[in-house]
Amino acid sequence: QQSKPGPSSKSQVQGTADRSRMAGVSQGLEFCLAQVADFEEVMSISTDIYGGLDYLPTRYHAWLLEATRRVFLAKREGRVVALVSVSVVDDGRTAVVEGLRVAPAERGRGIAGQVQRHALGVMKSHYPSLKVQRSSRSGPLGPEVMAKYRMICHQGVLVL
């Protein structure tokens, strides 16, 4: 029987020892796994997302329960300043980065990159076969974005 990559159970990942291995500190930011109790603070940094039609309030709690997904927070002085979610698909070969949020007052300081690098580093340590990263983006994609990334899918949604 072939074993699946990564942690053997959700309880193993949510254990105290594992949570501490997923934490870290960098340039005044503390990184940790999101918890149910963080919901209101996470929502407070997301108030201006998607013109009030943000999907995160309906996905947050479900994400915390997914066996191959981790939701990471960046905190400054104990306050949530960023969030990113990473799920692992393709038998542990691909990381899908979703839900990136940075508090309005913290934007433009490189925090998005820091929390993503931390999250992907942790996921790679738990899933050694992880080789590919996929991200979702919204809004207009300017030339600087298109120069950095290769578009593999384009989808639009019309809300009436």
Image: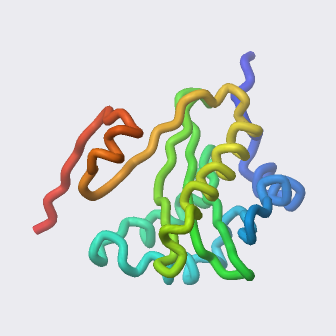
Coordinates of residue 68 in the picture (x, y in percent): 62, 44
- Residue 112 in the image: x percent, y percent? 54, 60
Front-most of 34 and 144?
A: 144
Residue at 79% across, 59% down = 24
From the viewer's perspective, is residue 6 above or below residue 65? above
Where is residue 14? Give x, y as percent.
Answer: 77, 57
- In-front residue for pair 144/125: 144
Q: Quadrant of the N terminus?
A: top right
Taking the spot 55% from the left edge, 83% from the top edge, the residue there is: 40
Which residue extends farthest right? Answer: 17
Q: Nearest the camera: 143 or 99? A: 143
- Residue that appears at 27% across and 50% down: 142
- Tell me the quadrant of the picture where the C terminus can be found: bottom left
Work out whether 5 lies above or below 52.
above
- Image quarter of residue 46: bottom left
In the rendered structure, the answer to whether residue 3 lies left or right of residue 53 reads right
Q: Residue 59, percent across and down? A: 46, 63
Report the side of 137 relative to 106 (left or right).
left
How is colour applied across the structure in the image? rainbow
**Relative vertical location of residue 95 with respect to residue 92 in this rendering, above or below:** below
The image quarter containing residue 132 is top right
Q: Which residue is outermost to the top?
A: 1
